[in-house]
Image: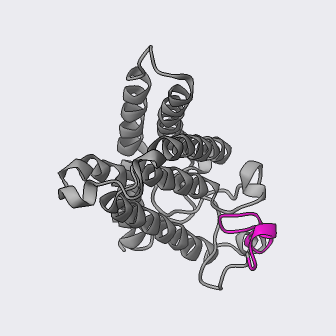
Amino acid sequence: MPRRFAQVIVFVEKYVLSLLFLYFGIEQATAVHADAEFPALVNHLLRGVLQLVAGIALLCNSAPKRLPADLAEIVVPLLGSYFYLLYNFAAALPLPMQQMLGPQSWRVPLAAIALAMSSAGLAIAVWAALTLGRSFGVVVAVREIVRRGPYRYVRHPIYLGYLLHIASLWLAMPSAGMALLVAGHALLTLWRARLEEAGLSAHSDEYRQYAHRTGFLLPQPFTHNATPSPDRAGPRSRRG
């Protein structure tokens, strides 16, 4: 990829995408209903805070030591960031794909579990984004390695939070259509994380050593093998 094009993408990420995140964050925060119940209110605010943190972090992030190397390192993260827009079209799916799977009596318990799971995932993502600070980014690039906070235990705590939130969307609306959307979103998120590992590990021996001591999405005691393959590792730069 031409270096000039990669520099333009990083510029757009910093000064355009940041404003989009701030816009969605403000919209989310101002859309809170005064009569919203406490659990739902917390979840709503967490979504707004995550968007605001992402916007501010992008505006303040440091210049990358390594720019995106190919189109996949740009396109996949962008698709992952804005995949949520596709959920707005769930109501346009054929009626059989909108029907709830399982008995109606499950709806309330599943909704409660979904709310708790989503809130936990969003809280993890906010914590991790705040920890990344100026190393935060959207496209795959290399900045300072971060090993504090949740990054002491896993290499991609933000994506762990995203996956919890994504899974909660299906629990809240357990239909075949939503299952397809959620599966696609989850696979895209994992692909995004693996792209980062591949690009970042090639740049830093320090990160490869760090990756040897931490899990991919779960802490090492919960994984059989947290050591990435030789082409799947790297420093902090982005959303993961």
Q: Is residue 63 left or right of residue 3?
A: right
Instruction: Return the residue nearer the eye: 226 or 69.
Output: 226
In the rendered image, which quarter is residue 206 located in?
bottom right
**On the picture, is 219 further left or further right than 217?**
right
Image quarter (top left, top right, bottom left or bottom right) of the C terminus:
bottom right
Task: Give the number of callouts.
Answer: 0
Taking the image as shown, residue 65 lies to the left or right of residue 11, namely right
Using the rendered image of the protein, determine whether residue 24 is visible from the camera's viewpoint: yes
Corner quadrant of residue 34: top left
Residue at the location (38% across, 23% down)?
31
List x then y, in percent, for residue 25.
43, 32
- The image position of residue 103, as x and y in percent, is 41, 53
Which residue is located at x 35 percent, y 55 percent? 83
Q: Would you place residue 124 above or below residue 203 in this image?
A: above
Question: Can you see residue 7?
Answer: no
Q: Please identify the quadrant where the N terminus is shown.
A: bottom left
For residue 213: magenta?
Answer: yes
Of residues 202 and 173, the one drawn nearer to the viewer in this rendering: 173
Range drawn in magenta: 210-225
Q: Per the image, is 55 magenta?
A: no
- The single residue placed furthest to the top in the displayed view is 34
| Residue at 77% over, 51% down | 148
